[in-house]
Amino acid sequence: MAGVEFSRVRKEFGGFTAIEALDLRIEEGEFVSLLGPSGCGKTTTLRMLAGLEFPTAGEIRIGERVVNDVPPGQRDIAMVFQSYALYPHMTVRRNMEYPLRKRGLPAAERQASVLMAAEMLQLTELLDRKPRQLSGGQQQRVALGRALVRDPQVFLFDEPLSNLDAKLRGHMRAELVELHARLGRTMVYVTHDQLEAMTMSDRIAIILAGELQQFAPPQEVYRAPANRFVAGFIGMPSMNLVDGRLAHGSGSWQFMAPGIALPVPALAETAVAGEACLGVRPEHVHIGAGELQGRVQLVEQTGHENIVVLAVAGGIRLTCRTPASMIPRMGDTVDFRIDSERVHVFAPGDTGPRLNLPA
Amino acid sequence: MMAAMSTGGGEPGSQAESRTSRSPQAMLERRYARLGLLLIAPSIVVFSAVIIYPLLAAIYLSLFELYTPTLEGGFVGLSNYRELLARGEFWVSLRNTLVWTAGTLSLQIVFGIGMALMLHQNVWFRSLARSLILFPYFVSTVVAVLVWRWLFNDLYGILNHLLVEARLIDMPIDYLGAMPNAMISIILVGAWKYFPFVVIAVLARLQTIPDVLYEAARIDGAGPIARFFDVTLPQLREVLLVIVLLRAIWDFKEFDLIFLLTGGGPVISTQTLSLLVYKEAFALNQMGMGAAYGVVMMAIMLVFMIFYIRQARKGDSS
Ligand SMILES: Nc1ncnc2c1ncn2[C@@H]1O[C@H](COP(=O)(O)OP(=O)(O)OP(=O)(O)O)[C@@H](O)[C@H]1O
Ligand SMILES: [Mg+2]
C-alpha cells in the first residue's frame, strides 16, 4: 500500500509552463479525482505520476520511493486510458494477461489472476474475443481488467468513462466505487466531469491552469469553495456570482450591488471594504416572499424541480431552484430573498479567495 | 399519382416489380444499370487492351514456333513447353530467380523496417531523411547501374581501391564476373534500389499506430524489444503482407537491373527467367519459345498471388 506525493512539481513543454508548482499529498487507499477545465494539466499530472512524462522540477513519490527516474513498468502502477489502449491483435485474455507475462509470472498464476479479474468484471464469456469485437463498455471493462490483474499500488485513470453513454457511465461509476471499496488501493482519477468527481472521490483536487485551487472532500468543496473559481466550477447549475461592494458598518458586513443589499455572515480578518464578489447557490435563492425583486427571464422545467433565471437591476442575473409545483410566469416580476446565512464572499479576481470565516 | 404512391408505399418491393416492370421504379433501376455499364466501359476497354490482350496473345504465341523478325512459322502445339521443361537452362534460371527474389526481398524488408523504425524515432530527422531515402528508388535504373558498375569495377572501382588500401584484401575482387559474387552483388544492388519502397510504406503505417498503445505497454512493463514484437510488428502485419506480395512480384520479374549489371553472367549464373525470356525472343529470335517462358513465369506468379490473397483473407476474417 502506498500513497502518492507531489512536491513542488513543475512541468514545462518547450517554453510553455503547463504546471507551475504542484504540491499534492494523496493518502494510502484514497480515491482522489483531479478535476478542472480542459487544458488545466490534469492529464499531464497523471502522466508524470505514470512515468510517461518527466517533471521539469520537483519530486514525485509513490509510497516512500522517489519515482522521478523510475520507468513506468517499475512504478507498480496501472493505468486505464480514455481510449482504453487495448492491444488490437490480442484476445481479451491475452490483453489482460500481458502485464503479468511481462513480469514473468508462471502460466498457472497468470491464468488464475485473469480468471478472477474476468469474473469480477463479468468478462468471462468474452475472454477469447478480440477488442474490436467488443462494445465500448466491454472494452472499457477489459482495460480495467488489465489494470486489476496486476494488483498495483496505485491505479491511474484518465477520463476512463468519457467514451461511454450516460447510462453506462452511471453504472461504471458505481462499479468503480465498489471496486475501490473492495481493493482499498490508492486511485487517482482524472476527469472534467464534476458529477464523477463528486460521487466517487474521497477528495477532489481542483486544478486551474496548472495550479491547485482546492483539495478537499466533495462536500467541503461544495459547501466551502476555497475561491471564486472553485465556487463557479462546482455545482450544477453553477453558483451565482455577483460583483459588488463590501461595506463595514456597526460591527457587521454588508454586501451591495445594484438591486441587492444584504447583510453577510462573519468574514475573515483579511476582508476589507471595497470590491468583492458574492456567491449564492441557486438553492439559496427563494422566490415567493422577500425584500428583493426580479423579473422572471427563463424557466426550465427539469421534472423534479424548475430552474428559474431572474433579472435583477443592473444587468445582474440570478439562477434559482424552485420546487416542481412552483412555476413562475415568464416576464412576471417576483419577490425573492437570499438566504444570507448561506452566502459566500470572495475577494475580487477570477480566483479571489473565500472571505467567509470557516464554518 | 395514386399508382406511384401505392408502389412507393408499404408493399414489398419485389412484388411491385414483378407485377409491372414498367413501374417508374423499375425503369429508373434499369436506367441506372445502363449508366453503370457506360461508366465502367472505358476501364474495361483499357484493361482488355493492355492486360487481357497481351496475356492471350502470349499464350497463343507460345503454341507456335516463330522467327521473331518476321513472326513466321508454324503451329507446334505444346511442344515448346515440353522442350522448356526438359532444358537445364530453364531450371537453372528458375533457381536463379528464386535465389535473387528471396535474397533481395528479405534484405529489402529487413533494411526497410529497420530504417523506417529509425526515421520514426525523430520528427526532425524524418522529414529530411524521407526525401533522401527515396533517392535510390527514383533514380533511373540505367543511371544507378552505371554508378554501381563503376563502384564495383575490378580495375578502377572505388570499392576495391578502398578495400586494398585498408589492407582487407590483397587482390581486387571481381564483383560481377565471378560467382557467387555476381549473385550477391545483384541482390545487394536490388536491395539498395528497392528498400525505400518498404521504408515509405512501413513508415506510413507506423505513424498511424496510436502512441497510447506504446504507453500502455510501457506501463505493463514491456521494454523496447517487447514493444516492437508485441505492438509494432503485429500492427505492421497487414502492410507487410502487401509489401511482400508486391515486391515479390516485382522482384520476380525484375529485368533491367540484372540485365544491365551482369547480363545474366557469368555464363548464366545470374540469368533469371526474365532474362531468359528476353534472350529467347530477341537474341535467339525464338518468339514462340520466349512466349512459352513468359507464360510459365506468369503461372508461377499466379501461385504467389493466390497464396497471398488467401493469407490476406485469413487475416481479415480472424
Ligand atoms: N506534449 C505536449 N507538448 C506541448 N504542450 C502540451 C503537451 N501536452 C500537454 N500540453 C499542454 O499542457 C496543458 C495541459 O494539458 P493536459 O493534457 O494536461 O490538459 P488536461 O487538463 O488533461 O485537459 P483535457 O481535459 O482537455 O484532457 C495544455 O495547455 C496542453 O496544451
Ligand atoms: Mg486530459
Image (cartoon, coloured by chain):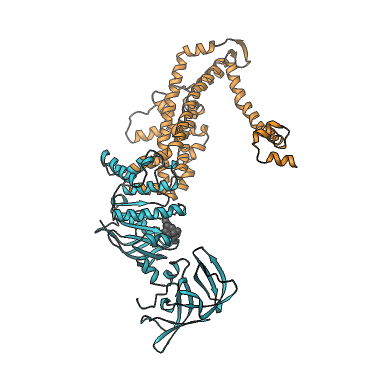
Q: Is residue B9 above or below residue A260?
A: above
Q: Is residue B314 above or below residue A197?
A: above
Q: Does B143 sit left or right of A265 as displayed? A: right
Rendered-image quarter of ligand 1: bottom left
Q: Does A237 sit left or right of A126 as displayed? A: right
Viewer-nearest residue: A176 or B300: A176
- Name the quarter where the C terminus of chain A is drawn: bottom left
Residue reaching furthest to the front: A325
Instruction: Please identify the quarter of the rendering in which residue B20 is found.
Output: top right
- Residue A81 x, y percent position in the rendering: 39, 51
Q: Which chain is orange?
A: B
- Residue A1 x, y percent position in the rendering: 25, 56
Q: Colour of chain A?
A: cyan
Residue reaching furthest to the right: B1
Viewer-nearest residue: A145 or B114: A145
Q: Is residue B288 above or below residue B206?
A: above
- Residue B249 x, y percent position in the rendering: 49, 28
At 36% from the left and 56% from the top, the residue drawn is A47
- The image shows a total of numbered marks equal to 0
At 36% from the left and 69% from the top, the residue drawn is A220
- Residue B199 x, y percent position in the rendering: 45, 39
Instruction: Please identify the quarter of the rendering in which residue B18 is found.
Output: top right
Q: In this view of the protein, can residue A285 be seen by the observer?
A: yes
Instruction: Please identify the quarter of the rendering in which residue A355 is found.
Output: bottom left
Viewer-nearest residue: B138 or A60: A60
Q: In this view of the protein, can residue B223 be seen by the observer?
A: no
Viewer-nearest residue: B243 or A183: A183
Residue reaching furthest to the bottom: A250
